[in-house]
Image: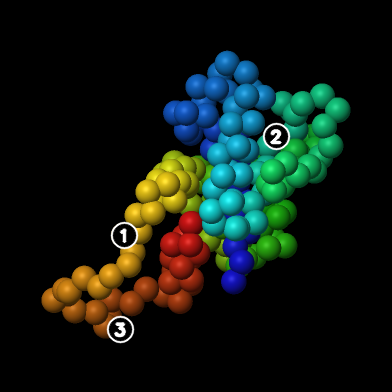
Amino acid sequence: MSIHIIIDGYNLIRQSSVFSALDREDIQRGREALIDALAVYRKMKQHKITVVFDGINAPAFSPNKDRIKGISIRFSRNGETADTVIKKMTVVEKEKALVVSSDRQVLHFAACQGCAIIESPVFEEKMATAGYKNLTGFDDETGWMPTTKKKGPAKRLSKRKRRDRIKIKKL
């Protein structure tokens, strides 16, 4: 099953120490750095990625939809916020989507639509970990670890939470 990662662009940029420093210098540099990092991540993981930005700070003469380095980029229209665009996308995508944001309202709406959710700093950490594993060839998920911990139906997560966990593990 393919995952469509929908990212609240400025939210991720402003939550990140690396991207926010570039964003404070020049908003365009912050956007470009995020897109470059996502393009590298996409090469490793092959997920469909859409970044949604508020149209207020859009570059002059930019279209509402664009595609750069395999990353879909959407700017909200006049009088519309990126949060509204993300909510519309989650209604369409439903369980296929994973929403990245730290905005509680967006995350709650996405979860109600059946989407998996992850906060921006956690996603940034997952991107960094994937990059590290790719460079070093290190994969800590292989191999069996003996344990005496008991597992069974009483400890089992709900079906929806197990599905969300699988999506997040694919990051």
Up-down relation of residue 10 to residue 147 (above or below):
above
Q: Residues within 10 Å of mark 2 (few under 14, many from 20)?
A: many
Mark 2 or mark 3: whose residue is earlier in sequence: 2
**Left or right of residue 63, residue 24 in this image:** left
Under circle 1, the secondary element is: loop
| Residue occupied by mark 1 | 140
Q: CA distance from mark 2 to mark 3?
A: 44 Å
Q: Is residue 120 visible?
A: yes
**Farthest residue in the bottom direction?**
153
Nearest to the observer: residue 118 or residue 108: 118
**Left or right of residue 114, residue 53 in this image:** right
Residue 88 % position (x, y) = 72, 54
- Residue 38 marker: none
* Dot 3 amino acid type: Pro
**Farthest residue in the top direction?**
25
| Residue occupied by mark 3 | 153
Residue 106 % position (x, y) = 58, 48
* Dot 1 amino acid type: Asp
Quadrant assignment, res 109: bottom right
Q: Is residue 73 visible?
A: no
* Residue pictured at 81% horizontal, 40% vertical: 64
Up-down relation of residue 136 to residue 61 (above or below):
below
| Residue occupied by mark 2 | 54
Q: CA distance from mark 3 to mark 1?
A: 26 Å
Nearest to the observer: residue 157 or residue 58: 58
